[in-house]
Each structure stands twice: as C-alpha cells, then as structure tokens.
C-alpha cells in the first residue's frame, strides 16, 4: 500500500512540475507576443504565427503529459486492486476524498493547458 502511495505522489509531483514549467514558458511567450504587437520589436510577421503555434504545442504537450500521469495512476491503482482482491476498493483507490472532489481537484491540472491552448488558437485565427 505504501508503494502505491509513493507512486501516486511521484506522478502528482510530475504533474505539478509540468504545470509549473508550462506556465513559466507560456508567460515568456505571451510577453514576447505582446512586445511584437506593441511595436517594441521589429521582427518578421511570421513571428506572430510562430509564437502562438509554439504556445499551443507546449500547452497540448503538457496536457498529454498530465493525461498520461493520471492514466498511470489509474493503472497502478488497478494493479494494486488486482493484487489485493479481498481489500475493499476504497482502501486501494482512494487516499483522500473521492467522487466529485477527486475530479474537481484534477480540473486545474487539465484546465490550465486547455485554456492556454484555446487562447493561442484564438490568436492564431484572429
């Protein structure tokens, strides 16, 4: 049971790191994008396409990494449940709140890359 908890904590830490790096990178990209359009920088017009494309790609890659981490957590929980079939599922799968609280807690991890992807898509199209 402790091994499962350690693996889940590890995956959650990876999610935290991915989000942190993505937010830092997105901040630099948005700052660069605003400099291009404020006239502070005189760069090629292609940069107005490249910056949103890079921002969109990094947000989508972060989203896929977060989804992979949660899939890994689910697989570890299922594997643990298979090894302890007599234990109640709640002992194996839940280390805290379950139900809606679990999904609301994951909303931030999934929501930030989706919101940033949407912003970059908007800037690419308009």
Image (cartoon, rainbow, N blue to C red):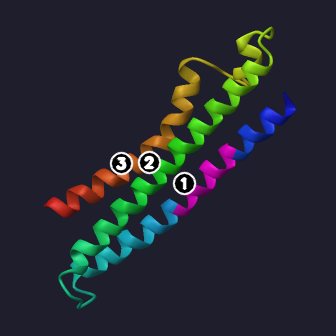
Q: Secondary structure at mark 1?
A: helix
Please state the horizontal and vertical placement of residue 110, each as a whole percent of the image.
Answer: 46, 42
Question: Marks 1 and 2, how far apart in space?
Answer: 8 Å
Which comes sooner in the sequence, label 1 or label 2?
Answer: 1
Q: Which residue carries the number 3 mark?
A: 115
Quadrant of the snapshot with the C terminus: bottom left
> Would you call the spot at circle 2 few (<14 residues within 10 Å), some (14-19), or many (20 or more)?
some
Q: In the displayed structure, does residue 11 sit left or right of residue 120?
A: right
| On screen, residue 94 above or below 106 | above
Q: Which residue corresponds to the image point at 48% horizontal and 35% vertical from the top-left?
A: 107
Q: Which is more toward the observer, 15 or 79?
A: 79
> Would you call the spot at circle 3 few (<14 residues within 10 Å), some (14-19), or many (20 or more)?
few
Residue, far bottom = 42
Q: Which residue carries the number 1 mark?
A: 19
Question: Marks 3 and 1, how far apart in space?
Answer: 13 Å
> Would you call the spot at circle 1 few (<14 residues within 10 Å), some (14-19), or many (20 or more)?
many
Q: Which residue corresponds to the image point at 71% horizontal and 38% vertical from the top-left?
A: 8
Q: Which residue corresponds to the image point at 79% horizontal and 34% vertical from the top-left?
A: 5
In which quadrant of the rendered view does residue 21 lie? bottom right
| On screen, residue 46 above or below 1 | below
Question: Marks 3 and 2, how far apart in space?
Answer: 5 Å
Marks 1/2 in contact by CB < 8 Å: the verdict is yes
Marks 3/1 in contact by CB < 8 Å: the verdict is no
Please state the horizontal and vertical placement of residue 57, each as a whole percent of the image.
Answer: 37, 61
Q: In the displayed structure, does residue 93 sit left or right of residue 114?
A: right
Q: Check residue 112 in the rendering and tell me which mark sits there, or answer none.
A: 2
Which comes sooner in the sequence, label 3 or label 1?
Answer: 1
Q: Please state the extent of the stretch shown in magenta in the rendering.
A: 11-21
| On screen, residue 36 above or below 90 | below
In which quadrant of the rendered view does residue 6 lie? top right
**Residue 10 highlighted magenta (yes or no):** no
Q: Secondary structure at mark 2?
A: helix
């Amino acid at each position: 049971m402790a091994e499962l908890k350690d693996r889940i904590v590890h995956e959650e830490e990876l999610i935290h790191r991915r989000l942190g790096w993505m937010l830092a990178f997105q901040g630099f990209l948005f700052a660069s994008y605003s400099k291009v359009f404020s006239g502070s920088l005189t760069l090629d017009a292609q940069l107005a396409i490249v910056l949103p494309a890079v921002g969109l790609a990094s947000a989508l890659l972060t989203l896929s990494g977060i989804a992979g981490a949660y899939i890994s957590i689910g697989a570890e929980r299922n594997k643990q449940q298979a090894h302890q079939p007599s234990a109640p599922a709640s002992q194996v799968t839940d280390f805290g709140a379950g139900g809606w609280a679990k999904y609301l807690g994951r909303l931030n991890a999934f929501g930030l890359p989706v919101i940033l992807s949407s912003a970059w898509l908007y800037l690419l199209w308009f």
